[in-house]
Image (cartoon, grey):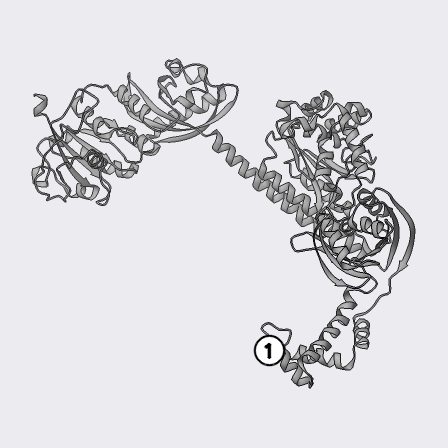
Amino acid sequence: MEQSEQRYALICVTGTADRQHRLSVALSERGVDAGSSTGGANASAVADTDTTTEITATSHIEPDHLTIIERTLADLERAEGGTANGLPDDVDAVVIDVDEPAALETALDWVDGHHDPAIESSARVVAPQDGNEALAAAALRQDVDQYVPSDEDALNRVLETVAEPTASTPDDEYHRIIANELPDEAFVIDEDGIYLEAKLRPASAELYTSPATDLVGASLDDIFPEETASSLSECVTRAIETEDVQTIEYPAETRGEERLFEARVVPIDERIDGKRAVIWLARDVTERAQREAELETLNRINAVIRQVIETLVDAPTRDAIERKVCAELVNSELYCGCWITERTGAGEFRYRMGAGEATTYLEAIRKLEDDASALSSATPYEEMSGDADADADTDADADTDADANAKTDLGTNTDTDTDTDTTTGANTNTSADTNTDNKTTERQRRPTEHTGITGEITSVNNILKTEPLPEPLQEAAHADNVRAAISVPIVHEQTTYGVLTVLASRAEAFSDTEQEEFRLLGETMGFSIMAVKNRQLLFADTVTELEFRIDGGETFSFDLSETYDCTCVLEWSGTTSDGQPIQYVRIDGLDGETVLEEATAHESVESCRLIHDGHDHCTIEMRLTKSGVRTLANHGATIRDVRVEDGVGTCVVEVPQHGDVRDVAEALSVVYENTELTARHEVDRPVHTAIERRNRVLGELTDRQLTTLRLAYFGGFFEWPRSSTGEEIAEALGVTPPTMHQHLRKALKTVLTEFFAEGNTAGGGADGSQ
């Protein structure tokens, strides 16, 4: 037949009537309106459309005419075949456009069960709009003539198949389908485990040192270790015997690493060289498995962190908090060691407690502690991106194991910065920084130091591969399988209580997500330590009162008093809702205009406003960049009085009778370099019952003030919305509204003074949180 006379009739099958067949879409995109019949079983005769000028097949066939008959699966179930049902006498191909294996099976059953010779002899082509591996596997099992993936020209591929129906062998068809669809790796493997065909996608082929063709003729036993090969062979046998698709996951060695693959094993009905065989469609699922493993690990980490946090609620002391944290972390089996260090007043970091099984590593740390020069060369921390040496020093801090009782100073011969990042005090003295800078020139900061000073998390992964540690520690890391480490600040507001360092045997243990979990743990520990300290003070009947002398601080109050010979008295210190330090300071001996001008220009003051201004005294509100006073409050001290005269400060605080006085003294010395404890004595707190406090307030109120309060309270003046207005309260009282408001304000001040000013002009309440 001449080319110009060639005609093709295609039955195009779709799943539903509202779905346009892929070939129709292709013709529409080419500007060809193919004659088609889309009716049911009783559709009228089919029209023909000349597509010669629009279609150029990649083969030598250029058709003159193309007839398309569109049918849905429902149409096929009703059709009996023949022209009476709208089908031509000759059908060249049935082109099936469905996405589900079950729908494909329905369509092919119709083709195979049709009694019309034209249908039975037609080519069977699967051309889905959105292909998938399950559909490709089903097409393989049904032995279709062609499978056209979604990224190929469906029309040309169909015409090629119709024009050369005998041009390929069954093996070629298997190979074509393997090349066409989805998996990273695809093979034909016979019942003896011998590779007959092999195909790798380019990205997958790059993982291997030899081409896929080298696999042909090899066996599973030649390629995989004995245990893996046996498992894969069993899967091949199971697929053949059950006549069902099997799924299996298995590891495979690639260039320098082991990757995980998932395979769908599809049995082939037709024998190849007299043997049963399977199509092996494999996908690299290494990243997916890693993500799943990471998610599972993160869930476990989250559970551990939450459990740790829950245990902190009832912890009675700081030691109990830290002991529980260490125990919970190592008992989770996610971590092989952890320890806690605290910063001393000298700027050093000393070990407090720890736990874990990395005993060799900890012993190596102890040996390094004896030689400061060894530690000095251990960690060029600031020169390494990603804190690759964090472990070295992280662990360098770790050098004491869980049961060690010695308070080993992990900062031996090292004066670390006392900059305001960690001390959080506005009064930081720069001379300490100068000393630190000189010493860190000789030995850069270890990660624990860096974390404690800057408040930044320090972490390192893949310790055994990157080998960032000095030789003794690197050997110990290999011995204890220490692969990752992290150092986390234990912090509340602007106060750093110490550093928690954790070791793990997982190479990629401390991802960004895991670091955020540890950041939360560090903040929770800091809050719990602060709460414990304040709780001890709150319920103490007897407290220790400490008086400190501070020479030469660098805050606004010190500078102002020295310049203008005035006195600065702290009336109250706290934080705003967003955590910014705020202070109310009374200045005696200087007018408000001058004070406001000086405060506005001072670098430690972020913003300020004048609250009260007199001729030679005033009160100012200041929002600070940092606050040394808050550091004391966060260490469990109630601030009773802070005043500065002639550049010399006096600070009076209360701590629990059996509290850690050294802890408070060191916290203050970190903020103010020249600090001296000048007095210490025990003070018995008077115990006031609720009735006593109520009677004392009532005794200070005038009758008119008390009556005004009662009328306002019971009249709903303090509700929102108000049940009574100020005018209504004034009318009930028999006075003018301004007079009523005057009585009300004085009464409220008397009540509030009982809570905010009694015996405490600086810190608010005993909890120091005001």
Which quarter of the rendering shows the N terminus? top left
The picture quadrant where one finds residue 360 is: top right
* Label 1 secondary element: loop
User: Which residue corresponds to mark 1?
Assistant: 723
Identity of the residue drawn at 67% across and 82% down: 730
For the question of whether residue 321 can be seen, the reply is yes
Q: Between residue 290 and residue 467, name the one nearer to us.
A: 467
Which amino acid type is marked by label 1?
Ser
Which quarter of the rendering shows the C terminus? bottom right
Identity of the residue drawn at 75% across and 74% down: 746
The picture quadrant where one finds residue 742 is: bottom right
Is the residue 348 above or below the residue 572 in the image?
A: above
For the question of whether residue 143 can be seen, the reply is no
Q: Between residue 118 and residue 643, name the one nearer to us.
A: 643
Identity of the residue drawn at 92% across and 54% down: 681
Q: Position of residue 22 (x, y in %)?
A: 23, 36
Q: Between residue 664 and residue 23, name the one nearer to us.
A: 664
Q: Position of residue 88 (x, y in %)?
A: 9, 34
In the image, taking residue 263 as reference, residue 502 lies left or right, namely: right
In the image, taking residue 719 as reference, residue 256 lies left or right, namely: left
Is the residue 473 above or below the residue 41 in the image?
A: above
Q: Position of residue 392 (x, y in %)?
A: 70, 27
Q: Position of residue 683 (x, y in %)?
A: 90, 58
